Image (spheres, helix red, strand yellow):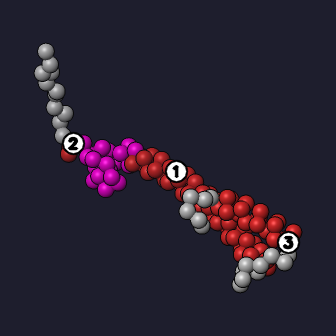
Amino acid sequence: MPKGKSLDDVIAEAEKIERVWDANPTFSLGDLTREKFKAELEGLRASRTQLEEARRQVTNLSNDTNERAASVGTNTTRALSGIRAVFGPDSTQYEEGGGTRSSERKTPKSKKGGGT
């Protein structure tokens, strides 16, 4: 794609050339024929359609993944809370589930007010 031009700009410019070429079928550019130009333009349109579909699919997959991650995260928190409730906050099971046993927690230190 030409530098600094969007895909839509390239297609719009090519469509202008296509209209002029259709109105003047005797126009030629050496080895570039009107049919070859049209085929390349159609190929570009098809590629753009495929790209847009792939982007849509990626967006849907990303949203689905994010929703599932949020659900699993919520369920993980609930499960850890359940393990704490059943086995206790100082249990091995609670630690294995990812919690910090209450006997291993540091005692909070008071902050000294050093301001004037």
Q: Amino acid under label 2? A: Arg
**Residue 5 or 59: which is nearer the viewer?**
5
Residue drawn at point x = 16 percent, y = 32 percent = 109
Q: Amino acid under label 3? A: Asn
Say which label, 3 or 1, has the lower sequence index: 3
Q: Nearer the viewer, mark 3 or mark 2?
A: 3
Q: Which residue is mark 3?
A: 24
Residue 60 spot, x, y in % from top left: 62, 57
Residue drawn at point x = 71 percent, y = 75 percent = 40
**Residue 33 or 103: which is nearer the viewer?**
33
Q: Amino acid under label 1? A: Ser
Tag of residue 17? none
User: Label 1's element?
Assistant: helix
Say which label, 3 or 2, has the lower sequence index: 3
The reply to whether the magenta stretch includes residue 91 is yes
Q: Which residues are magenta?
A: 81-102
Q: Which residue is mark 2?
A: 105
User: Label 3's element?
Assistant: loop
In which quarter of the view is residue 68 placed? bottom right
Left or right: residue 16 versus residue 88 is: right
Q: Is residue 18 above or below residue 88?
A: below
Q: Is residue 101 above or below residue 49?
A: above
Tag of residue 71? 1
Q: Is residue 46 visible?
A: no
User: Label 2's element?
Assistant: loop
Is the Cβ of the residue at disc 2 closer than 8 Å to that at disc 1?
A: no
In which quarter of the view is residue 42 placed? bottom right
